[in-house]
Amino acid sequence: DGGITQSPKYLFRKEGQNVTLSCEQNLNHDAMYWYRQDPGQGLRLIYYSQIVNDFQKGDIAEGYSVSREKKESFPLTVTSAQKNPTAFYLCASSIRSIRDPWGTEAFFGQGTRLTVV
Amino acid sequence: DAKTTQPPSMDCAEGRAANLPCNHSTISGNEYVYWYRQIHSQGPQYIIHGLKNNETNEMASLIITEDRKSSTLILPHATLRDTAVYYCIVYNQGGKLIFGQGTELSVKP
């Protein structure tokens, strides 16, 4: 089945450690996104990538890093510089189409809940 | 910044139509309006999108005003499973998909 997979679902880390969240899609989508969601809040864009080997900062990129070496993978590293890393992290992907040239519906993974202690 | 404004919460009786408004007064001519919903602690789910014509699919209808400054998502017969946070999004030409705070819809028996 095609889809977008985030792993792990729950992640615990000690303060000061870097941690990498996985996001893989087999939908052949060009664009991929990382969002952060805090309790009772909406989604905030961290990074996004429109094509392999290219990515742009979103609204809250400080303390995070990404790579896009393969079309199907867009891992997010939460570094020790991120002051409040505990949050729910969501990855999404979308494809451009003739019908919808600015990108079409985005498919989301089920999220990774990161807790830093 | 999000380019949309939505009421923070709404209630709807089960079986009735749920009409969720969204204001996007600064929308550009070729920007699409998208609607997603998020059930607690899950990834958001795509519902529908449109440019200027009204749209309908198996989940909902989207009504966009003629000046495109606002839209309404209609769930024709709301069920308890439609309780969720609904996000209205204007797709940015630069590739950003920016979510606002959304509307928390509570469908009550």
Image (cartoon, rainbow, N blue to C red):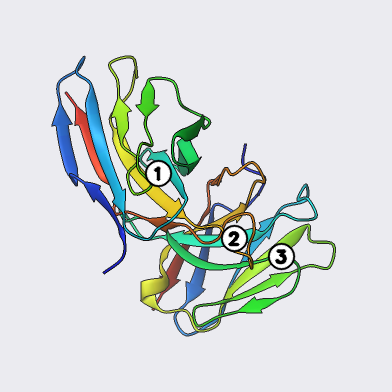
Q: Residue A73: where, in percent of width, then height?
A: 32, 44
Identify the residue at image location x=59%, y=60%: B34
Q: Crowding near pointer 3: few (<14 within 10 Å), some, many (20+)?
A: some
Label disc, if present, on residue A40 of the rendered structure: 1
Tell whether A79 sits left or right of A107: left
Q: Compared to A4, does A70 lie above or below?
A: above
B60 or B95, nearer to the observer? B95
Identify the residue at image location x=41%, y=79%: B79
**What is the chain letter for disc 3?**
B
- Please, what is the three-letter code of the amino acid marked with disc 3? Leu
Please, what secondary structure does the residue beneath circle 3 have?
Answer: loop
Q: Which residue is mark 3?
A: B51
> N-terminal of the two: label 2 or label 3?
2
Q: Residue A109: where, in percent of width, then height?
A: 32, 54
Q: Crowding near pointer 1: few (<14 within 10 Å), some, many (20+)?
A: few
Closer to viewer: mark 1 or mark 3: 3
Please, what secondary structure does the residue beneath circle 1 have?
Answer: loop
**What is the chain letter for disc 2?**
B
Q: Quadrant of the N terminus of chain B?
A: top right
Q: Residue A91: where, in percent of width, then height?
A: 36, 46
Identify the residue at image location x=17%, y=42%: A10
Residues at discs 2 and 1 both on one chain: no
- Residue A33, quarter of picture: top left
Label disc, if present, on residue B34 of the rendered structure: 2
A29 or A48, nearer to the observer? A29
Residues at discs 2 and 3 both on one chain: yes
Q: Crowding near pointer 2: few (<14 within 10 Å), some, many (20+)?
A: many
- Please, what is the three-letter code of the amino acid marked with disc 1? Gly
Q: Quadrant of the C terminus of chain B?
A: bottom left
Real-space CA distance between mark 2 and mark 1, rounded to the nearest whole angstrom? 21 Å
- Please, what is the three-letter code of the amino acid marked with disc 2? Tyr
